[in-house]
Structure formats: C-alpha cells, structure tokens
Amino acid sequence: MAQEVEWTPQALADYYSIIQYLEKFWNTSIAYDFMRLTERRLQSLAEQPLLGLGSEKQPEVRSTLLTKHNRLYIKTKEPS
C-alpha cells in the first residue's frame, strides 16, 4: 500500500520556484518534463519509501536524484 506524500511549505515553494525558472529560462516543455519526472518519482517513493540514499545522520531522511541539478529529499515516518 502506498504511503501518503506530504509536502512541507518550503519544499513546495522550492518546487514552484524551479518550475518558474525552467519556464522562464528554458521552456514550458522542459518545465512539464520536470513536473512529470517529479510526479513519477514521488509515486515510486510512496510505493517504496526506502528507495534512494539513506542519511547516516538522520535515518528517516532519504534522497534521490531527479536531475543532475535537483535532488529530492524525503522524510519517512519510520527510520529505515
């Protein structure tokens, strides 16, 4: 069963900033690609929350690379 994904206010603000940047300096197609990639990765993480790299300092925090410039950090409810 997939877990629910909740965005922090800061994460959501950062996400929208990235999309606005892509639309302004690249194009709308690139922004949509980034949004689709993010949605697919979030779906995968909701289904398998232990994907990605675990943090040695904070076991409940994991990260996964979205693009060479963007890394997605998630905090699981239980330590991995």
Image: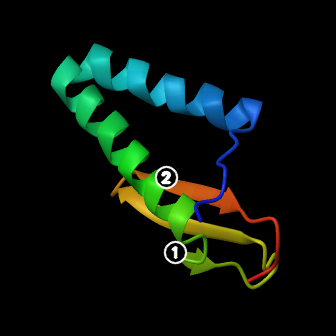
Amino acid under disc 2: Leu
Q: Secondary structure at mark 1?
A: loop
Which of the 4 image quarters holds residue 32?
Answer: top left
**Within the image, what quadrant is residue 7 found in?**
top right
Which residue is drawn at the image coordinates 78% and 80% (left, top)?
A: 59
Label pair 2/1, CB-CB below 8 angstroms: no
On screen, residue 42 above or below 30: below
**In the displayed structure, does residue 78 sit left or right of residue 7?**
right
Instruction: Point out the image quarter for the C terminus.
Output: bottom right
The local crowd at label 1, few if under 14, some if 14 to 19, many if 20 or more residues have their Cα within 10 Å, is: some
- Marking on residue 77: none
Report x, y in % for residue 60.
Answer: 78, 72
Is any atom of residue 45 visible in this view? yes
Category of crowding for the residue at label 2, using alpha-carbon neighbours closer than 10 angstroms: few (below 14), some (14–19), many (at least 20): some
Q: Mark 2 — residue?
A: 42
In front: label 2 or label 1 = 2
C-alpha gap between disc 2 and disc 1: 11 Å
Task: Please determine whether, in this image, residue 12 is positioned above or below residue 70.
Answer: above
Outermost residue on the front side: it is 1
Check disc 1 and give the amino acid type.
Gly
Q: Quadrant of the N terminus?
A: bottom right
**Residue pictured at 66% horizontal, 50% vertical:** 4
Q: Circle 1 sits on which residue?
A: 52
Give the number of callouts: 2
Horizontal arrangement in the rendering, residue 80 relative to residue 41 (left or right): right
Position of residue 46 measured from the top left corner of the image (x, y, whole percent): 56, 59
